[in-house]
């Protein structure tokens, strides 16, 4: 299967190596950063140095490919999907942007190829888990999804280090959040809905952020009382972000905030990804709750270290592509994350990264 992989950043490089190593994919990595591409080229992976915002140049790279795997910043998702449609390619991406996903869904209507956005961690794997658990109930009451990509050793006031795209981080903090409350669809404010919980002996907070639940609101409309997604952080993070975004009005100057964070907040490869889903409802006349909890840790291999967010995000999209290639997903039109069977995902050679993580057995 011939793949055009757009983006050679940390996540893109991980995706490229995973797909290339199987021998089942011919991968060409497309980016404007010659330094990143050179690293992959030295490993025998084909590369193409072009400006990914140049539509004509990008289209030239997509022609003749079977699929596009997009690991570019979220604001390029619609452009990449449009070119994939134009060139007759299947399309997969990692976007958490709600508007981009809706636009891609519209363009996928009637398409001869498949369009599957939101194939990462959240949205992505978290929705697969939630849908799998919810299907086991006769009547679903509450679906709660909580995900955090956190530094293993927080040291600053925000108790946070950059573990993934700062563009995506700020984007999810600034846009309305879809949810279902009391059986009705609602649009909740980001950074609101603050809650605290303890998992595996560590204290956390969680609050509304946009994009994480993918298309679950639409899929479960009329069939669930309450459904929501919240981002997990260490206690105190939310209040400081509200101060920056609201009190200092940096929500209106996001580029300035991104610049500040890039200059002052170190990135880290020593992170942990927390996945926590609870579903409650009626089963055989009894009110029950099912919980799925995982902690995925960074791989500190000396030669090729991987952060937990690299592992989980790359595993999500690679598993989606792999399951598609095996014919286990629809082959055309818009493909939702909920159409991935959780057992198939966890049994997949890429998806097993989540299965090999440490399960958390208790919650207080």
Image (cartoon, rainbow, N blue to C red):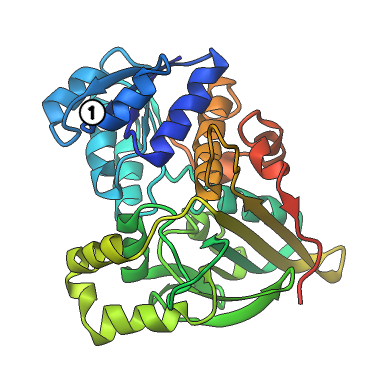
Q: x, y (%) of residue 324? A: 53, 26
Quick check: 294 above or below 210?
above
Can residue 37 be seen at all in this image of the molecule?
Answer: yes
* Left or right, residue 259 beside residue 208: left
Q: Residue furthest front?
A: 302
| Label 1 residue SS | helix
Q: Left or right: where does residue 171 sit relative to residue 151? A: left
Point 36% across, 77% down: residue: 241
Residue 170 position in % (x across, y down): 32, 64
Tell me the residue that label 1 is attached to. 34
Name the residue located 36 percent from the left edge and 43 percent from the top edge: 105
Query: Could you tell me if residue 112 is visible in this image?
Result: no
Q: Position of residue 12 (x, y in %)?
A: 39, 35
Residue 147 lies in what quarter of the image?
Answer: bottom right
Q: Closest to the observer: 41 or 120?
A: 41
Q: For the residue carrying disc 1, how many other residues have a C-alpha within 10 Å: few (<14), some (14-19), or many (20+)? A: some
Image quadrant in which you'd find residue 288: bottom right
Q: Residue at x 72, y 42 (%)?
A: 355
């Amino acid at each position: 299967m011939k793949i055009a992989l757009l983006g050679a950043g940390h996540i893109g490089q991980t995706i490229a190596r995973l797909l290339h190593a199987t021998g089942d994919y011919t991968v060409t990595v497309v980016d404007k950063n010659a330094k990143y591409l050179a690293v992959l080229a030295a490993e025998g992976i084909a590369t193409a140095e072009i400006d990914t915002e140049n539509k004509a140049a990008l289209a030239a790279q997509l022609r003749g490919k079977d699929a596009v795997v997009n690991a570019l910043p979220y604001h390029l998702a619609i452009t990449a999907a449009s070119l994939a449609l134009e060139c007759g390619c299947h399309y997969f991406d990692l976007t958490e942007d709600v508007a981009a996903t809706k636009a891609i869904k519209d363009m996928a209507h009637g398409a001869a190829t498949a369009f599957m956005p939101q194939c990462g961690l959240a949205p992505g794997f978290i929705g697969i888990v939630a849908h799998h658990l919810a299907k086991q109930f006769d009547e679903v009451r509450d679906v709660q999804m909580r995900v955090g990509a956190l530094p293993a050793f927080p040291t600053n006031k925000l108790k946070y280090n950059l573990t993934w795209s700062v563009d995506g981080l700020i984007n999810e903090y600034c846009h309305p959040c879809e949810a279902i409350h009391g059986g009705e669809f609602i649009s909740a404010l980001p950074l609101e809905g603050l809650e605290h919980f303890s998992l595996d002996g560590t204290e956390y907070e969680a609050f509304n952020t946009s994009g994480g639940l993918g298309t679950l609101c639409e899929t479960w409309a009329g069939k669930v009382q309450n459904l929501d997604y919240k981002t997990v952080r260490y206690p105190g993070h939310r209040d400081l972000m509200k101060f920056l975004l609201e009190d200092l009005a940096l929500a209106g100057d996001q580029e300035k905030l991104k610049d500040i964070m890039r200059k002052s907040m170190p990135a880290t490869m020593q992170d942990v990804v927390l996945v926590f889903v609870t579903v409650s409802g009626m089963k055989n006349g009894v009110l029950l709750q099912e919980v799925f909890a995982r902690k995925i840790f960074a791989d500190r291999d000396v030669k090729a270290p991987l952060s937990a967010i690299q592992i989980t995000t790359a595993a999500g999209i690679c598993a989606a592509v792999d399951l598609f290639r095996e014919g286990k997903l629809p082959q055309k039109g818009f493909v939702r994350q909920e159409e991935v069977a959780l057992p198939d995902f966890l049994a997949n050679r890429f998806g097993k990264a989540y299965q090999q993580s440490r399960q958390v057995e208790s919650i207080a």
